[in-house]
Amino acid sequence: MLGLLPAVGCSGNPIDPSPQSFELSCPAAITLEATQPGGAMATFELPVGRDGRPPYAIECAPGSGSVFPPGQTRVDCTAIDADQKRTACNFNVDVRISRMLAKTRLLAFGDSITAGTVSPALTFLDNPDSYPYKLEGLLRERYPAQEIVVLNRGLGGERLQSGAARLPGVLDADRPDVLLLLEGIISVRQIPTATNVRHLRTMISAARDRGIDVIIATVMPVGAGLEAKQPGINAAVVRLNVEIGNLAHEFALGDPVDLYGLFNASPFLIGRDNLHPTAEGFTRIAEEFNQAVISRYDKRAP
């Protein structure tokens, strides 16, 4: 009896009855911090194919360079070798948000100091020199995964009486989470402190009645030149600021943003018109409001 001969192909070589399987090795799981409101862009190397016959056609979905949303997303990768064998693997991309802001829509309300009048040029602007613009940049840098807006509703030359009348319509139109209130330097020169306090109380109440938080700031001092022309103006500022502190306590607003203390200690932050901040002064105002917002609304993810 003849023994069995090994199977051969056309070339005469033996045929492997159990060819090796075609496999695909995916990258390890990726963990990222969100860098934009949509999540984070993840880049990765394509998986490595082995035990098939090159060349390999390898694709992953979502692909490298895609923006992955917060949370965990599975990346599915497939491969086809030259013999049309198919294989697949997968891995996860986990996008975390470790730092969040509980309130993200802020409304800056006040007079020309809010509007962005820079001394000595006296130009009105909503540009990199206004404190709301700078504050928005600071908050977006710290909380890149969130859409944060700081609306500038400053109006040059406004007195508190006019501000109290204007504010409700602004609040209804803009619907902010938080009101940043810095106003009074125009009124303090001519209007009794008690009257100014009444208008501020009306403004705070208008926000609170609408469920809007309020962060109030003290009024800044004026420069020596303006004090010389209008003796006693800084004393009136101090009187108003005492009452601003009392209002903050009355409405449980937290401590006022102490711009008086900041500018009184650093008078060079007041420009040559003795009233409006320099560009650096606006930066410091933004930084003070930034710290107040963070202290109240910063949330760390579990």
Image: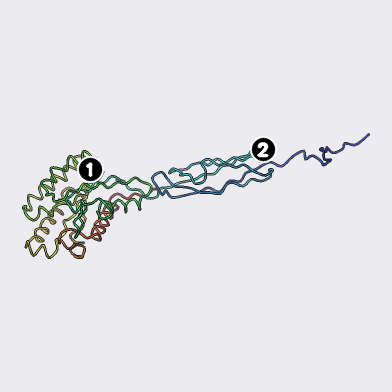
Q: N-terminal of the two: label 2 or label 1?
A: 2
Q: Which quadrant holds the N terminus?
A: top right
Near mark 1 (Cα within 10 A), the count class, few <14, some 14-19 or many ≥20, is: some
x and y percentages locating residue 37 in the rendered image = 38, 45
Distance between mark 2 and mark 1 Cα atoms: 62 Å
The residue labelled by disc 2 is 85
Q: Nearer the viewer, mark 2 or mark 1?
A: 2
x and y percentages locating residue 72 in the rendered image = 47, 43
Which residue is drawn at the image coordinates 11% and 55% (left, top)? Answer: 240
x and y percentages locating residue 99 in the rendered image = 37, 50
Task: Look at the numbered discs 2 and 1 and tell me whether their residues touch, using CB distance below 8 Å.
Answer: no
Based on the displayed image, in which of its 4 quarters is residue 285 positioned?
A: bottom left
The residue labelled by disc 1 is 212
Near mark 2 (Cα within 10 A), the count class, few <14, some 14-19 or many ≥20, is: some
Callout 2: SS = loop
Which residue is drawn at the image coordinates 26% and 58% (left, top)? Answer: 283
| Residue 30 falls left or right of residue 9 | left
Q: How many marks?
A: 2
| Residue type highlighted by circle 1 | Ile
Looking at this view, is 228 or 219 the one in front? Answer: 228
| Residue type highlighted by circle 2 | Lys
Callout 1: SS = loop
Which residue is drawn at the image coordinates 36% and 46% (left, top)? Answer: 146
